Image (cartoon, rainbow, N blue to C red):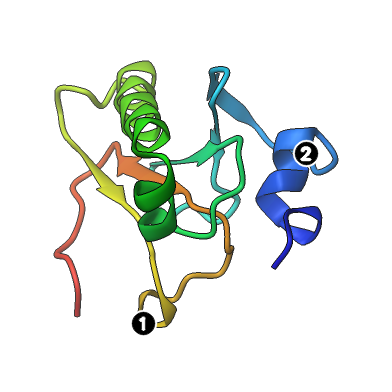
Amino acid sequence: MSAADCLFCKIIAGDVPSTAVHSTDTVYCFRDIGPQARVHVLVVPREHHEDARELAASDPKLLADVLTAGAEVARIEGIEESGYRFVFNTGEDASRTVFHAHLHVLGGEQLGGFGR
């Protein structure tokens, strides 16, 4: 998928509405439209990378920015102390639906087990 067809690239450009939570020069953080927890925020690098594996290989500094922004989102959302989960979905078995690297920040309630 090209960046021109990418939903998250369109959100970052302001062509598709979103609810911003945090923003830096390198990442944009916004509320997920189908939240899986009371707090569910997506942290998206402004630069298009297909997935976390490609992002890590091509720009480790940007991957660090994504993780740092995720921690800042947890602070902003008031879940820094109670706990939160970071999730990257990479590859077909992860049920990835948007082909632009993004970190899910989940929390604000007791989260269930992980996996099956």
As drawn, 85 above or below 73: below
Q: Quarter-wise, where is residue 39 in the image?
A: top left
Q: Is residue 96 visible?
A: yes
- Residue drawn at 19 percent across, 73 percent down: 115
User: Is label 1 in a helix, a strand or a loop?
Assistant: helix
Instruction: Measuring from the top left, give residue 17's x and y in whole percent.
Output: 78, 39
Q: Nearer the viewer, residue 84 or 24?
A: 24
Residue that mark 1 sits on: 93
As rendered, which of 114 and 50 lies closer to the eye?
50
Q: Is residue 37 visible?
A: no
Query: Dot 2 lies on which element?
Result: loop
Give the residue at mark 2.
17
| In the foreground, 93 or 2 | 2
Residue 63 image point, x, y percent: 37, 38
Residue 25 placement (x, y as % from top left): 57, 18
- The residue located at (39%, 25%) in the rendering is 69
Name the residue type under label 2: Pro
